[in-house]
Image (tube, grey):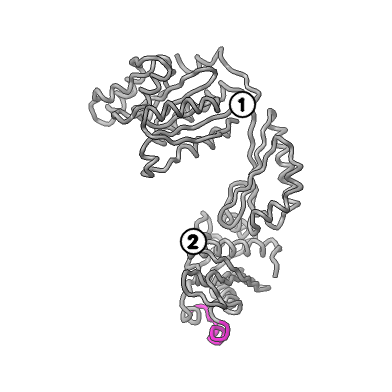
């Protein structure tokens, strides 16, 4: 019997949120030998169809742990998704544990045997008895075809709960989820519409952002929730709305985004999942501007961020990594007296770097960095984390002093993000001189 046949007369109507829990099985995950990327992918895809993941649990290849995890999960969730432990070796216990858990027995599933046989034939290998055993499945489960591997998936139902067991191999699991599991879960459960809106901010810490948005956040409808997601150099604001009418929900969500654009316009650099370097690239391209970089303390990292975006050759001309003062003098024409009077880490030096790299590459914009990334090199007057950045175009030059006081790599990364934000501000006329 197919999953589609199984669903025809058994569709359940749920007006409440549908909750899922993910259980990943495998000592290799707990030992840190592999990273569990499956759960993140599954969570994203489940959200798209209105199913919320409330817990992710990683456990060892132990029958006792698997049973305990299943017992706990079914008290909290409507859907329990299990990955791992379906291989042919003795340490792969999932199938045998599930057979006992659902009080059934193993039975040869001929279509699965055919699939396994064809896979071995295509690889020019003989089907072993060990691999043949993978076609034996719990009698009460609905088999889920695995066209990319030898371990079929299994769909169980108990007390209006759905349990799905899938291989831990990511490409096998993803194919099984996409082709079968996700469509059948959506058919089985009456799921609400869930819509996410992401607003990207930069240049403002989370606490200050929260203060600015406090009144707006309190006025949000109950079915729209806000999450603050801090990351390097910025904060992602994620609005999550839930309802029964997708069109109406979309309209409500967009209205709230429009309010944000009015409240914090200077800090929003993009709507949606887009990086700051990509947003800056779009601004440069839209205006037909070109840019060049002069880097000291960032050592080329700023150039890397800019050129990580496809199509950056339309606006990025090149860079000079002037780490040593002699290079600043020789390649960027920084005046010797500027370095002697003010030092390499100074407003005067970084301004000359930005202006001169713009002239050298004949670009519309030049930017520069010079600072003390650490952990050594600091002084009482200029401690580690003291960094100057500058922006220059045909009309003006702007410099900013940064004080990050972080470790070396973070200082470099934060500096690159600060320069990109300075370019963004300058192109949108929000920079404070």
Within the magenta stretch, is there residue 333?
A: yes
Tell me, yes or no, whether the two marked residues, 1 and 2, touch with CB atoms within 8 Å: no
Check residue 377 for magenta coloring.
Answer: no
Mark pair 1, 2: CA separation: 43 Å
Residue drawn at the location 72% of the way across and 36% of the way down: 222
Apparent side of residue 155 relative to residue 226 in the rendered image (left or right): left
Residue 404 percent coordinates (x, y) = 57, 65
Classify mark 2: residues with Cα within 10 Å, few (<14), some (14-19) or many (20+). Answer: few
In the image, is residue 167 above or below residue 362?
Answer: above
In the rendered view, would you say 255 is above or below 3? below
- Count numbered badges in the picture: 2
- The quarter of the rendered structure image containing the C terminus is bottom right
Give whichever of 180, 135 is nearer the camera.
135
Q: What secondary structure is the magenta-colored segment mainly? A: helix
Q: Residue at x 50, y 35 (%)?
A: 56
Looking at the rendered structure, which numbered label has been put on residue 180? Answer: none
Instruction: Give the quadrant of residue 86.
Output: top left
Which quarter of the figure has residue 415? Answer: bottom right
Viewer can see residue 309? yes
Stretch in magenta: 331-342
The residue where tag 1 is placed is 191
Between 155 and 100, the one nearer to me in the picture:
100
Q: Residue 195 placed where, x, y %?
A: 64, 36
Q: Is residue 356 visible?
A: no
Say above or below: 219 vs 291.
Answer: above
- The label shown at residue 304 is 2
């Amino acid at each position: 019997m197919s999953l589609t046949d199984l669903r025809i007369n058994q569709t359940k109507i749920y007006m409440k949120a549908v909750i899922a829990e993910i259980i990943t099985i495998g000592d290799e995950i707990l030992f840190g030998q592999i990273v569990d990327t499956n759960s993140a992918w599954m969570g994203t895809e489940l959200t798209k169809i209105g199913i919320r993941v409330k817990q992710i649990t990683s456990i060892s290849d132990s029958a006792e742990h698997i049973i305990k995890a299943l017992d706990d999960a079914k008290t909290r969730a409507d859907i329990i998704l299990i990955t791992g432990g379906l291989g042919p070796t003795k340490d792969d216990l999932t199938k045998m544990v599930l057979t006992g858990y659902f009080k059934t027995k193993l039975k040869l599933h001929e279509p699965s045997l055919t699939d396994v046989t064809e896979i071995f034939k295509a690889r020019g290998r003989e089907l072993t008895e060990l691999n043949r055993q993978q076609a034996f499945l719990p009698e009460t489960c609905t088999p889920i075809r695995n066209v990319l591997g030898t371990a079929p998936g299994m769909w169980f139902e108990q007390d209006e709960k759905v349990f799905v067991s899938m291989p831990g191999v990511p490409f096998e699991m993803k194919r099984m989820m996409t082709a079968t599991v996700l469509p059948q879960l959506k058919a089985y459960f009456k799921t609400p519409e869930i819509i996410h809106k992401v607003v990207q901010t930069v240049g403002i810490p989370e606490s200050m952002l929260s203060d600015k948005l406090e009144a707006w956040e309190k006025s949000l409808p109950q079915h729209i929730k806000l999450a603050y997601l801090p990351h390097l150099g910025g904060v992602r604001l994620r609005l999550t709305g839930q309802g029964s009418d997708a069109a109406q929900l979309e309209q409500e969500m967009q209205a709230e985004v429009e309010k944000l654009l009015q409240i914090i316009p200077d800090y929003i650099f993009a709507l949606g999942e887009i990086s700051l370097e990509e947003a800056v690239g779009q601004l440069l391209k839209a205006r037909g501007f070109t840019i060049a970089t002069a880097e000291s303390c960032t050592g080329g990292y700023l150039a890397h961020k800019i050129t990580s975006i496809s199509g950056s050759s339309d606006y990025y001309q090149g860079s000079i990594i002037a780490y040593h003062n002699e290079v600043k003098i020789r390649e960027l024409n920084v005046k010797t007296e500027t370095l002697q009077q003010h030092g390499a880490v100074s407003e005067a030096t970084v301004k000359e770097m930005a202006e001169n790299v713009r002239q050298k590459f004949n670009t519309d914009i030049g930017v520069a960095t010079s600072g003390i990334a650490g952990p050594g090199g600091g002084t009482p007057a200029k401690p580690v984390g003291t960094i100057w950045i500058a922006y220059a175009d045909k009309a003006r030059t702007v410099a900013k002093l940064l004080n990050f006081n972080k470790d070396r790599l973070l200082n470099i990364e934060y500096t690159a993000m600060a320069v990109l934000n300075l370019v963004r501000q300058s192109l949108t006329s929000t920079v404070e001189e």
